[in-house]
Amino acid sequence: MPPLIRVHRLEHPFGLHYIVCATWGACYGLRFDLIVVLAIVANFIVIVSGNPLNALADVRNDRATHDKRHIADAVREIGTYRLGVLVALEMIIALAIATVVSWKAATGIALIILVYLAYNVEPLRLKRRGYLGPVSMSITNWLLPSVIAYGAAGGQPDPAVWLVFAGACILASARAVWWAVPDRTADARVGALTPVVLHGRRHALMVTARITVAGLLLLGGGLWLRYGGAWAVAGVVASATFLLATELPTTSLMRRYGMTLVICSTVVVASIPMLA
């Protein structure tokens, strides 16, 4: 696999996952014109740009983790300087495209970039700060892209839609903690203070189970308020299917099969406005 594909994490099913993250918020605005497409493109570019930034920041960690060693190898093949320049260019391009859409979209993309930097770069390095790591990544991959696409599609302030977006963001935070469980030993070895390293497997899983329930309730509540009970049940059941992948033994298996379930469930949730 080419090194650029590896550092951007565009191998299946991740590439499709990023497209879904960039797009699904627009489905709640029920409009797909050129401006919306530009917003989705800006979303996709900025989401993907966070992966090589993370690869640069985590080279030592990735070398110590069997399932991620191929990413560290890709960084070495490309070169850290060239990869850093590429990350900067991608973020600038995403911001430029968003500026064409609107100042609100540009502000959203700028916030995603800032959170990515806070997640990866010292002194904040949110990835090492317990639950702040998963929360920040769910904001950059789910909440802000959804709001940007929804706004570009002409979506108006609606408490029901904000509940749906907030529920999806909370569910993404829980998934990030669950899928990091197999990395606990490697993360502890390199000093990455993830929730599982800080609090132990049992405590972290208990907390994320509660977070998952909260996310499902928010998502279901938003769908119920806007589309009715039957659609709310469909969205909640579809969104809960990722739990089927949480007991797989390795991170790569959990993410590969779990991500596929997440993609399918998000497509279901994104389809509800067009079907209801």
Image (cartoon, rainbow, N blue to C red):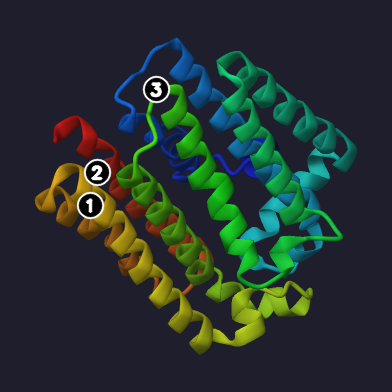
- On screen, residue 168 versus residue 128, left or right, reads left
Residue under pointer 2: 268
Locate the C terminus by quadrant.
Answer: top left
Local secondary structure at mark 1: helix
Compared with 21, 172 (above or below) is below
State which mark lies toward you, 1 or 3.
Answer: 3
The answer to whether marks 1 and 3 mark residues whose Cβ atoms lie closer than 8 Å is: no
Residue 2 lies, with reference to residue 36, above or below; the image says below
**Label 3 packing within 10 angstroms: few (<14), some (14-19), many (20+):** some
Asked if 197 appears above or below 138 in the picture, the reply is below
- Between residue 66 and residue 162, name the one nearer to us: 162
Check disc 2 and give the amino acid type.
Val
Distance from Cα at disc 1 to Cα at disc 2: 7 Å
First-in-chain label (1 vs 2): 1
Quote the CA–CA distance across marks 1 and 3. 23 Å
Mark 1 or 3 closer to N-term? 3
Asked if the residues shown at circle 2 and circle 3 are in contact, with their CB atoms under 8 angstroms apart, the answer is no
Which of 111/45 is in front?
A: 111
Q: Are marks 1 and 2 in contact (CB under 8 Å)?
A: yes
Q: Which residue is mark 3?
A: 154
Task: Name the residue rendered at 86%, 60% in the picture.
Answer: 123
The mark lying in front, picked from 1 and 2, is 1
Label disc, if present, on residue 235 of the rendered structure: 1
Q: Position of residue 51 (x, y in %)?
A: 66, 45
Within 10 angstroms of label 1, few (less than 14), some, or many (20 or more) residues? many
Alpha carbon separation for disc pair 2 and 3: 21 Å
For badge 3, the amino acid type reads: Gly
- Residue 65's spot in the image, x, y percent? 68, 68
Q: Earlier in the sequence, mark 2 or mark 3?
A: 3
